[in-house]
Every structure is written in structure tokens, then in C-alpha cells.
């Protein structure tokens, strides 16, 4: 039960942080381009790399990895997990799998958004 609470606490803090940081960056940029999301994804990937690098050396407890790596950064950006998994495949020399994962994730993500958006429009897209 304690593990779930750590993930939940980290997730709540990560989601709030994503909202604040992305909004702040987007406000500074003042552009149509999603600079806030790009900044959050890049920062989250960097932070997850650091957490997992420290964890690999035994410098981060399993509880801290759950709180920060899974909870906080999982809610801050799922892109960080995607980036780490792609890095792991590349590091293991699984280049075809890494390329399949990278391009497959991008393609399926965009297709998923298009299909979900289209379905919402077809069904009337009422508010939630």
C-alpha cells in the first residue's frame, strides 16, 4: 500500500508542476508553438535520466524511485519514460527495436489523437 501512496503523491505533485511549468514557459514564449510542453518533456526526460542513473549506482532508494521516477516524473511527463525506454534499447544495441519503438510510438500517438479527436466530433463531442 505504501508504494501506491508514494506513486500517488508523486503523481499529484508532478501533474501540478507540469501545469505550472508548462504555463509559465508558454507565457514567456507567447507563441502558438507548444514551447511549454516541449520544455516539460525535455526537462522531465533529463530528470528521469538523472534519477535512473543514480538508481543504477544504488544512490536512490526504491521508495524515492517510485516517488520521483514513477509518480512525479510519470505525471510531469510520460515522455520521459518513453525517452528512457528508447535509450535503454539503443544502449543494449537493439537498434531495430529502438527505431520501431521510436517511430511506432510517434506514429501511433499521432494516429491515436486523430482518431480520438474524430470520434469525439462524430459523437457530438459534448463536454465532460
Image (tube, rainbow, N blue to C red):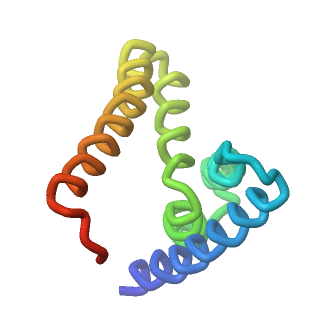
Residue 54 x %, y %? 69, 52
Kindly indicate the quadrant of the structure image that contains residue 112: top left
Kindly indicate the quadrant of the structure image that contains residue 127: bottom left
**In the current view of this chain or complex, which residue is farthest to the top?**
96
Residue 46 x %, y %? 70, 46
**Does the rendering let one see residue 33?**
yes
Left or right: residue 107 versus residue 126 is right
Q: Which of 7 and 63 is in front in this view?
A: 7
| Residue shown at 43% from the left, 18% from the top | 99
Residue 76 x %, y %? 58, 63
**Up-down relation of residue 106 to residue 122 (above or below):** above
Left or right: residue 37 versus residue 79 is right
Q: In which quarter of the image is the C terminus?
A: bottom left
Residue 91 x %, y %? 55, 24
Q: Which of 21 and 100 is in front in this view?
A: 21
**Does the rendering let one see residue 63?**
no
| Residue shown at 38% from the left, 27% from the top | 101
**Up-down relation of residue 84 to residue 2 (above or below):** above
Left or right: residue 64 versus residue 108 is right
**Up-down relation of residue 58 to residue 66 (above or below):** above
Q: Quadrant of the N terminus?
A: bottom left
- Count of residue discs: 0
| Residue shown at 53% from the left, 47% from the top | 79
| Residue shown at 23% from the left, 57% from the top | 120
**In the current view of this chain or complex, which residue is farthest to the left?**
123
**In the current view of this chain or complex, which residue is farthest to the right?**
28
Amino acid at each position: 500500500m505504501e508504494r501506491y501512496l508514494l506513486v500517488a503523491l508523486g503523481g499529484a505533485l508532478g501533474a501540478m508542476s507540469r501545469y505550472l511549468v508548462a504555463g509559465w514557459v508558454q507565457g514567456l514564449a507567447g507563441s502558438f508553438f507548444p514551447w511549454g510542453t516541449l520544455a516539460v518533456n525535455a526537462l522531465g526526460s533529463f530528470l528521469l535520466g538523472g534519477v535512473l542513473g543514480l538508481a543504477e549506482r544504488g544512490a536512490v532508494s526504491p521508495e524515492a524511485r517510485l516517488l520521483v521516477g514513477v509518480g512525479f516524473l510519470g505525471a510531469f511527463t510520460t515522455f520521459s519514460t518513453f525517452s528512457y525506454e528508447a535509450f535503454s534499447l539503443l544502449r543494449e544495441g537493439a537498434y531495430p527495436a529502438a527505431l520501431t519503438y521510436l517511430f511506432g510510438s510517434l506514429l501511433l500517438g499521432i494516429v491515436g489523437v486523430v482518431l480520438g479527436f474524430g470520434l469525439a466530433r462524430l459523437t457530438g463531442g459534448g463536454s465532460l
